[in-house]
Amino acid sequence: MSVVDANTGEVVLVAPDTLTFNPDNYGREAVDQSTVDDYAEALRSGAEFPAIEVYADGEIAGGVHRWHAHSAVGLDIRTVVVECPENMSRRVFSASLNVRNGKRQTRKELERIAIDEARGNPDLSQTDLADALGVARSTVQRWVAPITQAADRTRKLKASLLLDAEWTQAK
């Protein structure tokens, strides 16, 4: 069964085992089993949850706790396809979905995501990262300051070495 009608983009009901979960693209240290249990109990009593967000390839982008709860209860789950912005990792995008819906990451988890993203994706602005994580820009600046300071020192050292090399060659 396909996750979504490619022509209409409408929400589609699928079996949880048709979706994939990549922990590397998930911003939490672990799935909170008590949240899964609470969601499963609510499902058993007839509650309906918002559709979980998935990428076109069937990987879960947001709604991991809801996915686990539906799996535990044996119910199909509503899905909607989302697209990760080109300048952002799937991990950050997943965290951004939790700002609007679901169980938010802890400050420690958000800090780790920000640091990892600053190391691996220096092209993502701190403003965009802060907006995605639902925190103030000053918070992201504080979290990634050691990384940006080290990068600045490296750039200055490289520039100095290049200038020295040019000075030596000019003589």
Image (cartoon, grey):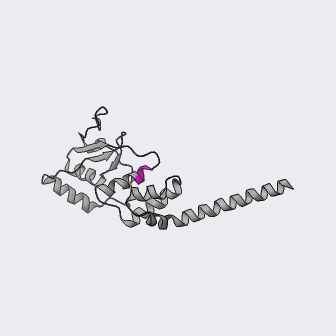
User: Image quadrant of residue 104?
Assistant: bottom left
Q: Position of residue 130 (x, y in %)?
A: 42, 59
The quarter of the picture where the C terminus appears is bottom right
Report which quarter residue 65 is drawn in.
Answer: bottom left
Q: Position of residue 44 (x, y in %)?
A: 14, 53
Marks counted in the figure total 0
The residue depicted at 23 percent of the width and 53 percent of the height is 69
Q: Residue furthest top?
A: 7
Classified by dominant secondary structure, the portion drawn in magenta counts as helix
Q: Position of residue 31 (x, y in %)?
A: 32, 58
Span colored in magenta? 88-92
| Left or right: 116 in relation to 107 | right
Residue at image coords 25%, 62%: 34
Write the residue at 49% across / 55% down: 125
Of 123 and 19, which appears nearest the observer? 123
* 15 is higher (above) or lower (below) than 161: above
Which image quadrant for residue 15?
Answer: top left
Residue appearing at x 54%, y 66% in the figure? 146
Q: Is residue 131 magenta?
A: no
Q: Nearer the viewer, residue 30 or 146?
A: 146
Is residue 1 shown left or right of residue 114?
left
Q: Position of residue 96 (x, y in %)?
A: 37, 54
